[in-house]
Image (spheres, grey):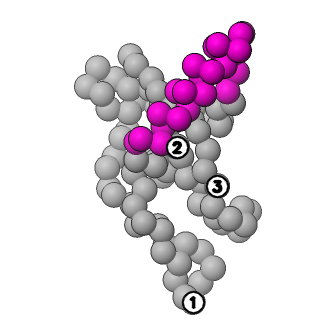
Amino acid sequence: MTWNHRVFLIPSSSVLEEDLYVIKRVYYNEDNEIEFWSKDNITPVGNTVEDLEEELNNFYEAFNEPVLMEEGDTVVEVGDIEYDEDFDEPIIDVDLVDYH
């Protein structure tokens, strides 16, 4: 099983005033499909400055992949986000790629 860091969108809601982007760790099965992901955001840490630098480089690589968003018990790639003029909630156009 392999893993990497990915950017996740947490869309605005009645609890969260604005969209929020975070880094989570994503784990892949043998077919390179997302198997599961971390519940919480990942904070860069290291036992040495070099370890921390390597961890930050792993974070930067997440920006080379599509942004993900949790949708129930699955993860989908995020498309463009549009806001309906009559509502405060975003209309999220997601690519329907089911990773779970």
Q: Position of residue 79 (x, y in %)?
A: 40, 61
Q: Position of residue 93 (x, y in %)?
A: 40, 66
Q: Secondary structure at mark 3?
A: strand
Counting other residues with Cα less than 10 Å from the Cα at mark 3, is it few (<14), some (14-19), or many (20 or more)?
A: few
Going from the N terminus, do you reach mark 2 or mark 1 first?
Answer: 2
Q: Is residue 59 magenta?
A: yes
Q: Position of residue 48 (x, y in %)?
A: 71, 10
- Read off the residue under disc 1: 86
Is residue 37 visible to the viewer in this orientation of the structure? no
Rounded to the nearest angstrom, the CA distance separating label 2 from label 3 is 10 Å
Residue at 52% from the left image edge and 83% from the top image edge: 84
Q: Position of residue 9 (x, y in %)?
A: 55, 52
Indicate whether 56 appears above or below 20.
Answer: above
Residue at 55% from the left image edge and 72% from the top image edge: 90
Q: Is residue 57 left or right of residue 75?
A: right
Going by the numbered disc 3, the residue's amino acid type is: Leu
Q: Is residue 82 left or right of residue 35?
A: right
Indicate whether 96 appears above or below 51.
Answer: below
Rounded to the nearest angstrom, the CA distance separating label 3 from label 1 is 22 Å
Start-end of magenta stretch: 44-65
Residue at 40% from the left image edge and 29% from the top image edge: 35
Rounded to the nearest angstrom, the CA distance separating label 2 from label 1 is 29 Å
- Read off the residue under disc 3: 20
- Read off the residue under disc 2: 7
Residue at 45% from the left image edge and 23% from the top image edge: 3
Determine which of the numbered discs, if any, sits on residue 78 in the image: none
